[in-house]
Amino acid sequence: MKKIFVSLLLVSTSAFAQEVSLKERLAAMDFYKKNYQLMFGAESSRRAESLLEAVKTLPAAEQSKVRKFVRDNESKVPEKILIPLVYWKFVKKNPTNEAKVLQFWLQTRLQILRDYADHPLKTSKSSQEAARQLMNSWAGKKNLTLQSAELVTDLKKQFPDLEEYSLVAGGFIPGNVVELISHNETSPDRIQWFNERVIFAGGSLDFTKPYMKMPLSAEDEGHPSFKDPMFAKIRDMIISAKESVFIDIFLFGGTMGGTLSKFLLDQTIEKKKNNPQFKVLLLHDFATNYNMQEEMMPVFDYIKKRIETESALKGSVYLLQANIQRHPPGIPFGITNLVPKNEKTFPALEKRGTYYESKIDHSKVIVVDAESNAPQAYFGSKNWTDHSGGYYFDNAIYVKGPAAAMVQASYYDDVDAALTLDANERKWFYYKNKGYSNEKYLKQRAQILSWFKLKRTSFPAAGDQVVRLAEANVDGKIKDARNILVDMIMNAQSHIYMEQLFIYDKYINDALMKRKAQKPDLKVWILADHNGNFKLGGLPNTLFMEQMLKHGVEIKARKTLGIEAHFPNGRKQEYHQENHRKITSVDGKVLLGGSSNLNPDTLQGSFREFGAQIFDVAAIGTFEKEFEQDWKDSSKTENFFAGAAGKVKLMGMELSPDVVRALNNLASSLVRAKDDLEKR
C-alpha cells in the first residue's frame, strides 16, 4: 500500500508560513473517496441494525464468534469501524477488505492527530507538536492487527482536549487571506429596477442598453449590482485572472447574468493576447431552474453562440452541463421510484422547473488561477441571477491562498462526471436537442481533465488565516457540513448566531436544543427565513420551531419584501425576497458559511454544495456586530410568527392554529423517522 497517510506538514498554522503543502491533504481526500464504498457502501457495513439482521443468517457457531468478537472489541473500536470490520470478517468474509478497514481506522487516527496539531483554536503548542510527532511516527504503518499500538493507544489520555473524530479528510489549510462579504442592495428600488428590465414575459436581453456594461468603479455607468460588494468581488477576480477561471453556478441569468457573461468572454479574448493558454470552464446544472428557465436560458444561449462562432473563444471556453445522476435522491421514502425513468417520461420531466429526484448541483463557486502563486476562490449562498440573487440577503467567503487551490481540486470529480463515458448517464442530460449535452467535448475529455486537474501541490502562503473546507461532493460520498456544524454547536460556550434560509434538519436542531439544555446561559439566536415564496405560513421552517422555542432557542425572521412585478406581456407575478443566507458563527471564534441549507436533502448529499469554516476573528466580529444590531432593530427583524407566518391556507380557507400545529408535528415526526425508514 502506498504511503499516502498524512505526514509532517511543511507549515505551522500558528504563524505566517512561506510555503504550504497540499500533497498529504489531497492524498487523504483521495484515500477517503476510494475506500468509501468498502466502508459504507453496503447497508450492513454502515448500519448496526442491518448488520444484526445479516449476522442472524449465519450458522449458530458463527453468530457466537461474532458476539464474542463484538464484546471483546466494542470498548476500543469505534462503531463506524467495528460495523464494517464485522461485516468483512464474518458476513462477507474477505481478509483483504478486513485489512483495509484497519488501514482506514489508522488513517482516521492520523487525521485526528493532524487536526489536533493544526487546530487554530487549540492553545497548547507543546501538545500540538507532540501530536504531530506521534502522527509522523505512525504514518505508513502496515500489517495492522487489533492489538497494534497505532490503533489502541489512548489518545485522550495523552491529549485530554483532543476530539476523537476527524470531520474533514482535507483538514485545516493554513496560509490564506480570508474575507466575509455580506452586502448587496436589497431595497424596494432595486427589486423594482430588476422588474422593469425583465428579460422574459415580453422582455429581452439587450446588450446595447447602458446598464448591460460592467462598471469598473462605483462612479462608472453600468449594471448597478456590480457596484455592490458581493458582485464587485466576482468582477475583480475575473479582472485579476491571468491563467484560468472556473465557475460552477446554480442560478445564472437576467441582466446580471448577461452583463457578467459578456464581461467574462470579452476579458477572455483580451487575456489570451498575453496568455494564449488562458482557459475558462463554466459548469451548470440545467436540470433544475426553479422556474427561472426564461431568465437563464437566454444567457446560456448567448455564451454558447459566442463559443461556437468566435475563433478567439474556441478551445478556450468550455460550457459543461453538470452531471447530477451520481447524487443520492433528495425526495424521501423512495417516492421517485414511482415515476418510470425512461425515454418516454424524459420529455415531460425535462419541462419541469425542478429535477424530480431532487438531485441538484447547488454550487455558487468561482476559482481564479488555481495553479498560480496566488489562487483565489469565492463561494457562498449567492446566486447570480436577477430574481434569485439580485436583491436577496446572502453571504460569500473569499479566500486567497492554498485553500483556494483546494477548491478547484475538489471539483475535478465534477468535471470528470460531466464528461462521463456512461451512456445511461448521458441520456439524462437536459436540452440535448438544443446542444447542451457534453457530447461535443468528449473527444477533448482527456485534454480538459488534464488541464483542470491540480498538478501543483505546494503554494506560497498568502496570509495567516486557516480555512477548513466543507462540502457535499458530486456523488454524495463527502457530506461534512452537518458534522462540522454539530461540532461547532456542541463546543459553544457563549453564543450561537445563525442566519438560515432553512432550519429543519433534525440533527442540527437537536444539537441546538441539547447544547442549550447543557448550558442554559448559552445565547442561541436564529434569523430564519419565513419562506414567503412558499406561502405556507413559514413551512417548512416551522417543523421543529415549537420544540426549539420551548428549549429557549430564540428565533426571529428578517423583514423581507414582496413586490408584484408587471411584465411587458401583461403578466403579473409577485417576487418575494429571501433571507437566503446559510451562515453560523459561534463565540466570535469560528464561522461556517457556504451554499448548504440546513435541511435533510442538502445535508445528506443530494445537492452538490460548497462552503468553509473560517477562524478570522476580525471578519467574524464584523458579522456578529451586524447580526446583533439587526437582531435588536425592529425595522429589520421581527418575531418569526408576525404577519402570515404560522397561518396556513388550504382551498382558500385558513386552518386553525391547532390544525397547523398538528400538521407541523406530523411532518416533523416523518422528518425524524426519515433516515431510519430509508435505512441511510
Image (cartoon, rainbow, N blue to C red):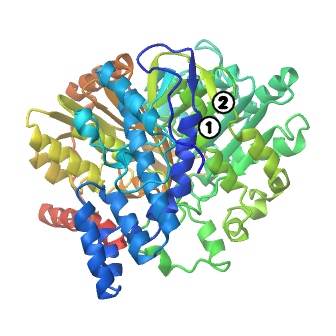
The total number of labels drawn is: 2
Q: Identity of the amino acid at label 1?
A: Gln
Task: Tell me residue 386's x, y (percent).
Answer: 55, 39
Residue at position x 28%, y 29% in the image = 636
Q: Is residue 87 above or below residue 291?
A: below
Q: Position of residue 253 (x, y in %)?
A: 62, 42
Count residues near mark 2 (Cα–Cα under 10 Å), then give few for <14, some for 14-19, many for 20+.
many
* Residue tagged 2: 370
Q: Is residue 618 above or below residue 348?
A: above
Percent of width and height locating residue 29? 53, 45
Q: Which residue is mark 1?
A: 408
Q: Residue at x 82, y 37 (%)?
A: 316
Which mark is drawn over residue 136?
Answer: none
Q: Quadrant of residue 667?
A: bottom left
Considering the numbered disc 1 on the image, is that residue within a helix, a strand or a loop?
helix
Q: Nearer the viewer, residue 120 or 543?
A: 120
Cα distance between the residues tagged 1 and 2: 7 Å
The amino acid beneath tag 2 is: Ala
| N-term mark: 1 or 2 | 2
Q: Is residue 413 left or right of residue 382?
A: right
Tell me if 263 is positioned left or right of 358 in this view: right
| Residue found at the very far right of the displayed protein | 311
Residue at x 16% of width, y 48% of height: 548
Can residue 358 be seen here? The reply is no
Q: Residue 641: give x, y in percent of width and height.
A: 19, 46
**Is disc 1 in contact with disc 2, using a CB cutoff of under 8 Å?**
yes
Does dot 2 land on a helix, a strand or a loop? loop
Residue 368 visible in the current orientation: yes
Q: Tell me the quadrant of the picture where the C terminus can be found.
A: bottom left
